[in-house]
Amino acid sequence: MIGQAINAICEIRTKKQAFSDNFQVSNPDGVEISIVGSLAGGTGSGTFLDVAFSAQRYLNTFAKITGVFILPRVFANLSPTTMVKSNAYGALKEIKYLWALTPSNTMEIDYGGFKVKAERPLFDTVFVIDAINK
């Protein structure tokens, strides 16, 4: 589904439709993807890297991936919150580790049906949102 969505965005017909609908298209050669989720645990912290790796598989070098992630303090008054800090810490460590990917320092992920070779950081920009400075 990620590949289909990216391909649809890249089609000339889609760009012409965006211009005719008065949407601003920032870079005609690239795609901008925002991955939004929580790093506190559950689906967001469990899949954000897989979504980024899967998206990067279909992208060219003009593409940009931005991560926007919620930190655990946002969920302070909700239950269960026993592992949220550990989950977020682990996710942030993974982002930091993967930030060092280069053509000479690559990583390959085997998803069974396909492999992804990452040669650059997964994200061009990462924003983290906390409850302190609302």
Image (cartoon, helix red, strand yellow):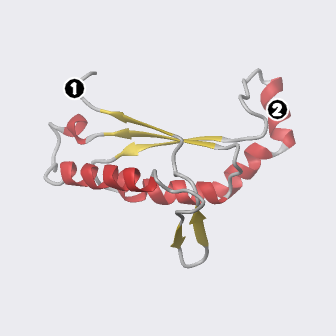
Label ID, residue 17: 2
- In the image, residue 80 above or below residue 128: below
* Label 1 secondary element: loop
Point out the image quarter for the C terminus.
Answer: top left
Left/right placement of residue 131 relative to residue 128 reads left
Question: Type of residue at label 1?
Answer: Ile
How far across and how far down the image is residue 26, in percent? 71, 28
Q: Residue at x 20, y 54 (%)?
A: 86
Q: Residue at x 38, y 50 (%)?
A: 96
User: Do we see residue 74 in this rendering?
Assistant: yes
How far across and how far down the image is residue 31, in percent? 68, 41
- Closest to the observer, 104 or 97: 104
* Label 2 secondary element: helix
Mark 1 touching mark 2, by CB under 8 A?
A: no
Point out the image quarter for the N terminus.
Answer: bottom right
How far is disc 1 from disc 2 in space, using C-alphas?
41 Å
Label ID, residue 132: 1
How far across and how far down the image is residue 7, in percent? 75, 52
